[in-house]
Structures are given as structure tokens and as C-alpha cells.
Image (cartoon, rainbow, N blue to C red):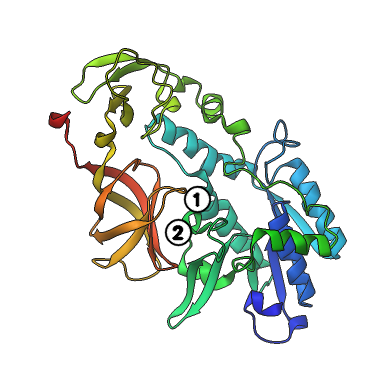
């Protein structure tokens, strides 16, 4: 299975560093690396929490997960190192997560984590250890193209994580390896069983590892106690329809939880106004946007003025769009496009890059409400 790591030369002369979260995916990557005969080193970053998340199912990079990663490395007979990056994770991921919610944005902390502590810091650590590559358990594929390494979707669309890796730079992609990108999850668990790894049946980590039970508001309150400032729920003409408990409880496209009675049609959150502390609501058609302006892009190929497929939410289907300057123009109205999310562009299965959604251009303006 040495070709999974796309390395040349004698296996025994190679050194592979594996980013290990304590889950089944990264554990299998470590096992596959060890099977090649290359010197394999497991690295775990302790990212957060010495308390409630340590023994919580579905977490990663916390206490129990670090113990699981260490046990896997012991089983495989490879070295394992733990580095404490809790302070940096809080500063660059958790604080940003809280600030985004307070500013009326819908954050994606998994991308921030990959951009920072995972790829940037692990990249440096792997280099310092003299590794030939850094391997992870992400479900994406690294394909050698005519102009160098390319990032492609995973073969199993249900496991694909390419949306969360749009910010991977070309330099990082040249060094990274993703051995699981061509495998279905069932086969990965079967490999873990064959390797005798205790994590073979361990549940997958949730999308946002530091959010207990999906309660985003509780995390934001803990980091920013002032977050629950109440305000008005208004329609698109500015008429007050009710009150809210804080912007952190709402995201663009949300329908439930508005608690506005006596209306003839369902209303949705159209946008959040942090300056006025207002939740602006409107009919479903008010969610339709024709374009989105993106910032801080990372491109892995040509994207300007070329028809692409764009994915604007992690669970959304890619839709036809064209990037013109900073604006991503959709071929047909797209719904639920939220500032703070990412717009990721694809050419077939290849990830061409993406950027952060800053604002949108609605197909229905306020005067039509």
C-alpha cells in the first residue's frame, strides 16, 4: 500500500508523520504508513479542554482521544508525541467562532482549524522531524496533475471533506498525503479490525469538536458573556414583529425558533444586523441570492471568468456559478447563502479553491417585501 502515500525511493529510507486525532481514520492511516516499512511517527495536538470534553463521545484531540491515539501507536510499535496547542486553538479558532456569531456571521471553525493549528503547525512539526510527508485521515484525494499536486473530492461522496480543505495551499498540498480518499468508510473500519486497533468501532467525531451536544450558544456565552444582548425581530421594511434573545441563536435561513405568531406565511432569517442588534426576517423568496462577494481567497487553479460548480454550505449541493472579480455569480438563484460560510469552487472533482462569503446580492430587494 506504499503507493497510497505517493512517495518514491526505498520505504526504509522514508519517514512519515501522521496527524492523529484518536479516531479510527487517522489510526488506520498510521497503520497503513507503518505497513509500508517507512519510519512512522504519530503526532497529536491537544487542542482544548481538560474538563467536560475529555471523556465525551464524539470529541477529538481531548483527553480520551489522546489516550486512544497513544494506544494505537503502542499497538503499531511506532512513536507518538503530544503537543499542547490549547492556547493557540482557543485564540485562533474558538475566539473567532464566538466573534463571528456575535457579528452576525455563520462560522466554520473546522476550516479555521485546518488553516491554522492542524496544517500550519503540524506542517512545521513534520518538517522539523525530517518527514517526507504529513499524512492525515481526511477523506479527500491528492492527484498528481500536469502542473503538480491537485486536490480532489473523495471517491465516496458521503465522506468527502474537500469543502473544509479549500484553504489548503499549494505548498501544503505538495507535502500532504490523504491515503483514505479512495476508500469507503466501511473498508477503513475493516482495516482497523484487521490491524487489531481498539478504535475500530469508535464513533466518528462530530463536525465541531468543541461544541457539547451541538449547543453553539453555550460556547459563545462562555467565551463572550455579553453575547446574549436582546433586540428586535423586524421584517424587511423595518417593522418590529417580536423580540429575540441574542443574535447568537440565529443563522441565515433559519425558520424555527422565531416565535412570531399570527402571520399569514412562514418567515425566515434573511440577515442579521449586529449594529442594530436586529434579526431581519422575510419570506422564503427573500433568501434567494444572485451573487456572493468573497474575501481572502485561496486558489489552486484558474477560476476567473470560467464556469464552475460552487458549494456555499457544507451540506449544499454544488451549483453552477462563475467568479467575476470578487463576486461569485450563480447561474440560478441560490438560497441560504450566509456571510461567514465558505464558497468553494470545483472543476469536476477537482477543488479549485475558495474564499469566505462577506456579503450577498439578493434577487428580491427590500422594496419588494
| Residue 43 screen position, x and y as percent | 71, 58
The numbered mark, 1 or 2, whose residue comes first in the sequence reads 1
Residue at 69 percent across and 59 percent down: it is 186
Neighbourhood count class around disc 1 (C-alpha, 10 Å): few under 14, some 14–19, many 20 upward: some
How far across and down, in percent of the image, does residue 134 sit? 63, 67
Residue 276 in sight: yes
From the viewer's perspective, is 130 left or right of 157?
Answer: right
Regarding residue 273, the answer to whether it shows in the image is no
* Mark 2 closeness class: few <14, some 14–19, many ≥20 residues within 10 Å: many
- Asked where in the image residue 106 lies, by quadrant, the reply is top left
Residue shown at the point (42%, 21%) measured from the top left: 246
Q: Secondary structure at mark 1?
A: helix
Quadrant into which the N terminus falls: bottom right
Q: Is residue 125 above or below residue 284?
A: below
Viewer-proximal residue among 357 and 95: 357
Q: Is disc 1 in contact with disc 2, using a CB cutoff of under 8 Å?
A: yes
> Can you give x and y, in whole percent of width and height, for residue 217 in the image?
51, 26
Residue at the image point whose x is 76% and y is 36% from the top? 55
Q: Is residue 259 above or below residue 210?
A: above
- Is 62 left or right of 306, judged from the image as shown? right
Q: Which residue is mark 2?
A: 166
Task: Please report the residue visible at 38 percent of the width from the left and 36 percent of the height from the top.
Answer: 105
Residue at mark 1: 111
Q: Quadrant of the C terminus?
A: top left
> Quadrant of the rendered structure where residue 36 is?
bottom right
Q: Residue furthest front?
A: 264
Tell me the number on the disc at residue 31: none
Label 2: element kind? loop
Residue lying furthest bottom in this view?
A: 9
**Percent position of residue 114, x then y:** 54, 54
Side of 126 where 291 appears, left or right: left
Amino acid at each position: 500500500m506504499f503507493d497510497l502515500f505517493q512517495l518514491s525511493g526505498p520505504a526504509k529510507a522514508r519517514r512519515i508523520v501522521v496527524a492523529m486525532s484518536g479516531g479510527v481514520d487517522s489510526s488506520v492511516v498510521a497503520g497503513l504508513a507503518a505497513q509500508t516499512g517507512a519510519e512512522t511517527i504519530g503526532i497529536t495536538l491537544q487542542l482544548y479542554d481538560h474538563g467536560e470534553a475529555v471523556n465525551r463521545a464524539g470529541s477529538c484531540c481531548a483527553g480520551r482521544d489522546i489516550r486512544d491515539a497513544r494506544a494505537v501507536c503502542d499497538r503499531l510499535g511506532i512513536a507518538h508525541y503530544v503537543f499542547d496547542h490549547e492556547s493557540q486553538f482557543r485564540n485562533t479558532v474558538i475566539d473567532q467562532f464566538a466573534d463571528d456569531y456575535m457579528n452576525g456571521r455563520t462560522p466554520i471553525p473546522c476550516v479555521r482549524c485546518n488553516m491554522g493549528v492542524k496544517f500550519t503547525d503540524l506542517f512545521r512539526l513534520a518538517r522539523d522531524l525530517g518527514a517526507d510527508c504529513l499524512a492525515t485521515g481526511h477523506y479527500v484525494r491528492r492527484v498528481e496533475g500536469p502542473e503538480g499536486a491537485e486536490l480532489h473530492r473523495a471517491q465516496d461522496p458521503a465522506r468527502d471533506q474537500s469543502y473544509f480543505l479549500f484553504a489548503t495551499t499549494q505548498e501544503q498540498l505538495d507535502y500532504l498525503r490523504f491515503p483514505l480518499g479512495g476508500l469507503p468508510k466501511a473498508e477503513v473500519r475493516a482495516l482497523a479490525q484487521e490491524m487489531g486497533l481498539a478504535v475500530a468501532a469508535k464513533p466518528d467525531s462530530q463536525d465541531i469538536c468543541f461544541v457539547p451536544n451541538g449547543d453553539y450558544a453555550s460556547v459563545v456565552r462562555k467565551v463572550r458573556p455579553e453575547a446574549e444582548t436582546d433586540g428586535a425581530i423586524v421584517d424587511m421594511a423595518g417593522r418590529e414583529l417580536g423580540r429575540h434573545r441574542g443574535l447568537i441563536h440565529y443563522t441565515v435561513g433559519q425558520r424555527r425558533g422565531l416565535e412570531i405568531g399570527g402571520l399569514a406565511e412562514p418567515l425566515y432569517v434573511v440577515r442579521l444586523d449586529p449594529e442594530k442588534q436586529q434579526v431581519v426576517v422575510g419570506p422564503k423568496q427573500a433568501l434567494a441570492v444572485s451573487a456572493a462577494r468573497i474575501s481572502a481567497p485561496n486558489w489552486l487553479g484558474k477560476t476567473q471568468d470560467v464556469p464552475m460548480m460552487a458549494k456555499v454550505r457544507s451540506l449544499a449541493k454544488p451549483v453552477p456559478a462563475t467568479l467575476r472579480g470578487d463576486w461569485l455569480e450563480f447561474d440560478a438563484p441560490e438560497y441560504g447563502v450566509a456571510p461567514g460560510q465558505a464558497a468553494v469552487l470545483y472543476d469536476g472533482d477537482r477543488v479549485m479553491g475558495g474564499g469566505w462569503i462577506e456579503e450577498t446580492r439578493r434577487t428580491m430587494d427590500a422594496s419588494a417585501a
